[in-house]
Amino acid sequence: MTSIRLPRLTFWGSAFWAVMAAGLAATVVRFTQGLGASTNLSDGFPWGLWIGFDILCGVGLAAGGFVVAASVYIFNLDRYRPILRPAVLTAFLGYLLVVFALLYDLGKPWNVWHPIIMWNPRSVMFEVGWCVMLYTTVLALEFSPVVFEKLNFKRAKTIIHTISVPLVIGGVILSSLHQSSLGSLFLIVPEKVYPFWYSSNLPYLFFVSAVAVGPAMVTIESFLSWRAFRREIEVPILSKLAKVTGVALAIYFVLKIQDMTAYNLFPLILEFNLEAILYLAEILLGVVVPIILVAIPGVRMRRGGLFAMALFAVLGFILNRMNLSITAIERYSGVSYFPSWMEIAVTLMVVALGFAAFRLAVKYLPIFTVDSHGPKPPVSREYDVVSFHEAVR
Amino acid sequence: MAQYGILIDITRCVGCLACEEACAEKWGMSAAGSTEVSAFRNTEVREVDGTYVPRQCMHCADPTCVSVCPVGAFTKTPEGPVTYEPDKCMGCRYCLQACPFDIPKYQWESLNPAVRKCNMCHERILEGKQPACVEACPAEARTFGILDDLVKEATNRITGDPETYENHIYGVREAGGTSVLFLAPKPFAELGMKTTLPDHPLPTLTWEVLSRIPNYVFWSSTLLAGIWWITNRRNEVQAYEAALKKLEERGNGRNHPTN
């Protein structure tokens, strides 16, 4: 379990500590002076970078966990087993960081647990809160065999394996619910969202784009892990995964085209204002380009090509979430919002913590190894020919 | 129980700001400083082209703030006012984001911030008193009473003097109806009031999705379990057949040692 330290890492190491220092400074201001002093939020613009990036993007980018878990456990696609652990790890870390970032954004973070006892089933936010709580628990359980394996807790590991299928089914349902509900949050403000980004299909758009971008994040991680510590996932697996992204993006594209006609967006696009340019950038670079890239076998079969395709998809996804939460609201609010350095510092710190935690996990836990101790699915089990012979008779 | 409401007749408002002062006094806020509804001011009167236009919480019949709040910090009381409990609030500010009238405001500078908005003086209503702003108004621009009676009164004023009044009671239909109603001398859009709102309550937009969840959970779990059963069974059959084939090959192998 030794990792090869590349010279580049010194640069990234110093960058990491610089980001952490800035983030900690911002943390001090946030929790001693309040939201007003630390952010550029206002009554006219109550949700900013922390909601738009840390929450909306954070949850979406962690979608690889449920997509891969569903492929392996529910669809019994064994070829994805090697990426199960990195995908679940990413998702688990992602959700922990989302909750961590939420504590910065909430005005009264000490009341974050209130939805547990103070119910409002009519609130989308209430539903998202519950789903995130439950799904983070599911992810902790899904990830626990890795820790049990390291600690050699065989019995605990067996228990988790026994309940893995219902656990994963629960995880998939919870994921589909809150991934889509993050889009439903904006259904209630039809007159505040710039027409490019309002759609009665918002929950479907959010879910499909999360399915597209989750596997893309797994690909990006695999690429970075390969560069940093030569731990990698085989290209043929990532290539298959890229097709999942491609198909999901194609469905997403169709839904977007449907919005264009249903809401008659073409005259607005032709205005070529800031909104139109950002909208086109999001669709062309974040949806059309990755679909084309994944369609070219020469690109799809190479590690670099896969990385490029995944990067386009992820950046397009981030642009979409930022557009909906910030660009789309600016015109209505009449406020020109740009995050303060403290908002940016906290966001960068959250991202840096994610990278650091992933690195530590890969270093100390069996992440890039196929599970070799636990019970295996029937297809990979060496069947006892004699007992089969008995059974046949 | 009959719900209360406030009828605000913009044609009568003289812009004396007595309502603003009474409101600030009731909340213990300083009326000086900001001139718009803010964390320091729950009612405002602004001048739009020579007309004084009061603004405050509309106390919707089906309030967006009540529906979006994840912890139920807002309540549509049986008396009509929409109230807020800061002790429940966790500070997500979805109410600020979602309110169709942009009424809830936030104590951004506080370390224990609360949302601020008019509560129609709910505690005074329970004591049998009128809201402070209504009591303070010297021009009778504000009328407090049973909401249904106020609608009748407003209709009578319009039919009695169609020259003065714009033929529209703002708040009867807007966002599914509100407990605060407005009469105006000219179109409401010209007074800077929001006229783009749908006639149905906005929470129906999210409830349409949320109400499907129980059904969705039932069917998707059934479907996923079914998919698991089929794919698992397929793999088992494949393994079984592979084992059988192996067995046959071994049997053949004995007969033909050269293989």
Image (tube, coloured by chain):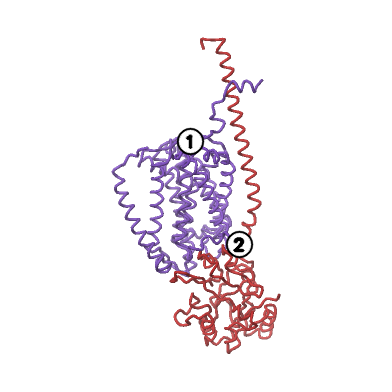
Chain colours: A purple, B red
For the residues labelled 1 and 2, say whether their Cβ atoms are less than 8 Å apart: no
Q: Amino acid at mark 1?
A: Asp
Q: Residue B53's spot in the image, x, y percent?
A: 54, 81
Query: For mark 1, does the 10 Å Cα neighbourhood hold few (<14), some (14 to 19), or many (20 or more) residues?
Result: some
Residue A169 found in image quarter: top right
Mark 2 belongs to which amino acid? Asn
Query: Which numbered circle lies on residue A371?
Result: 1
Image quarter hosting the N terminus of chain A: top left
Q: Position of residue B93 (x, y in %)?
A: 51, 66
Residue at figure coordinates x 47%, y 43% from the top left: A87
Residue A100 position in % (x across, y down): 45, 56
In screen coordinates, is A79 left or right of A122? left
Q: Which residue is mark 2?
A: A120
Q: Is residue A41 visible?
A: yes
Determine which quarter of the picture holds residue A151.
Answer: top left
Quarter of the image with the C terminus of chain A is top right
Q: Which mark is residue A201?
A: none
